[in-house]
Amino acid sequence: MDRSLLSRRLLLAAPLGLAVAGGVGAYALIERAKRGTYNPQDFNNPLVGHRVPHFALSGLPGQQGFDRDALVAMRRPVLVNFFASWCVPCVQESPFLDRLAKAGLDIWGVAYQDKPEATALYLAEHGNPYRRLAMDPTGRTAINWGLYGVPESFLIAPGGLVRWHVASPLFPDVIETQLEPALRKIT
C-alpha cells in the first residue's frame, strides 16, 4: 500500500477514534449518574491520608488564627472549612456549619482571599460557627492544601491526619452520606 494512502486513512480514522473514545466516556458518566455515584465536585485531594501541610495563618482581629502545630495537637476531630465572603455557596452552607458546630464538631475556618472587613461582615450576617478563624489573604495556604475552590472542607483526625475532603458545600446530603461516616471512622 502506498504510504500517502495509508497516511490519509490514518488521518481520517483519528476523528472517528476520538468520537468513539468520547462516546465511551460519556456512557460511563451516564451510568455512574444513574447509580448515583457521579459527583462532578468529587476528586481525590492528595492530602487525604497524609498530615496537614506546614502553614501559619493569623486570625481575623479578635479571633485566634492557627497553624499546622495547632491542628496536630488536637485530640478531637476538627473540620477545616475554607470559605469567602464573596462566595454564594459559602452563604448557602453557613446554616449547616452552624448546626454541626452546635452538635459539638470543632470547625476551624480559613477565610480565602478575603479582606478582614468583608469577612467580619459575612460572619455578622451569616453567623460564626468557627472555634478558630484564620485569614489566607494571598491564597498560598489554600494552594498548599490543594484547594479547588470555595467552599471546601477537610476533616482532620487527631494528630493532624487528613481523613476526608469535599470540594462542595456541606449540604445535608453530603453531611449524612460522607461527613458523618468519616467522623464515625475516626471516633
Image: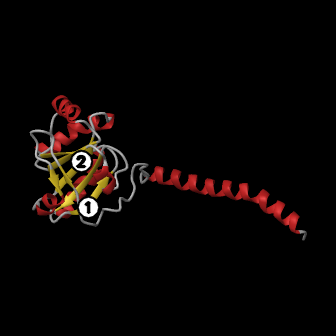
Image: 15 above or below 95: below
User: Quadrant location of the N terminus?
Assistant: bottom right
| Residue 106 at x, y percent in the picture | 13, 50
The answer to whether 143 appears left or right of 179 in the picture is right
Image: 108 above or below 45: above
Q: Can you name the residue that lies furthest to the right here?
A: 2
The answer to whether 101 appears left or right of 149 in the picture is left
Q: Nearer the viewer, residue 150 or 114?
A: 114
Q: Nearer the viewer, residue 53 or 168?
A: 53
Q: Residue at x 20, y 46 (%)?
A: 109
The answer to whether 93 appears left or right of 4 in the picture is left
Q: Which mark, by number, is residue 53?
A: 1
| Residue 23 at x, y percent in the picture | 62, 53
Which tag, 2 or 1, sits closer to the chain's start?
1
Mark 2 or 1, which is nearer the eye?
Answer: 1
- What kind of colouring is applied to the model shown? secondary structure
| Residue 105 at x, y percent in the picture | 14, 50
| Residue 140 at x, y percent in the picture | 31, 51
**How far apart are labels 2 and 1 at the CA level?**
15 Å
Say whether marks 2 and 1 touch (CB < 8 Å): no
Image: 29 above or below 170: below
Q: Which mark, by number, is residue 81?
A: 2
* Secondary element at image label 1: loop
